[in-house]
Amino acid sequence: MTSGNQRVQIEYCTQCGWLPRAAWLAQELLTTFGVELTELALKPGTGGVFVVRVNDEVVWDRREQGFPEPTAVKTAVRDRVAPGKSLGHSER
């Protein structure tokens, strides 16, 4: 799916104080995919949640994969919203 609405959602745990981490990751994604994304949402959650979704598909879940490195999330997002886009130096 490379056309139409491209929505990323980062759900983070407010109890754990993970807003700064979620906001930083959102900034990284917006910097990389500012043209491709139509929306990036931060969704407050509880219970240790830190999940990244692209168009409602989970692409990263902290419970299964640990906290993401930005490059890993960028790659997962890129594969869904802009296949073939170079991530530049962060891919090396």
Image (cartoon, helix red, strand yellow):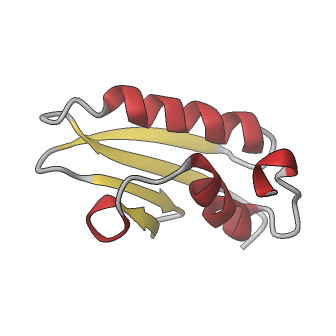
Residue closer to the observer: 3 or 60: 60
Q: Position of residue 21 (x, y in %)?
A: 40, 33
Looking at the image, which residue is at 44% across and 64% down? Answer: 60
Looking at the image, which residue is at 44% across and 56% down? Answer: 52
Residue closer to the observer: 77 or 69: 69
Looking at the image, which residue is at 29% across and 34% down? Answer: 18
- Residue 38 in the image: above or below residue 59: above
| Residue 45 falls in image quadrant | top left
Q: Position of residue 20 (x, y in %)?
A: 38, 26
| Residue 79 falls in image quadrant | bottom right
Q: Position of residue 61 (x, y in %)?
A: 36, 64
Residue closer to the observer: 8 or 22: 22
- Check the picture and name the quadrant holding the N terminus: bottom right
Number of numbered labels in the structure image: 0
Q: Position of residue 22 (x, y in %)?
A: 41, 36
- Residue 57 in the image: above or below residue 47: below
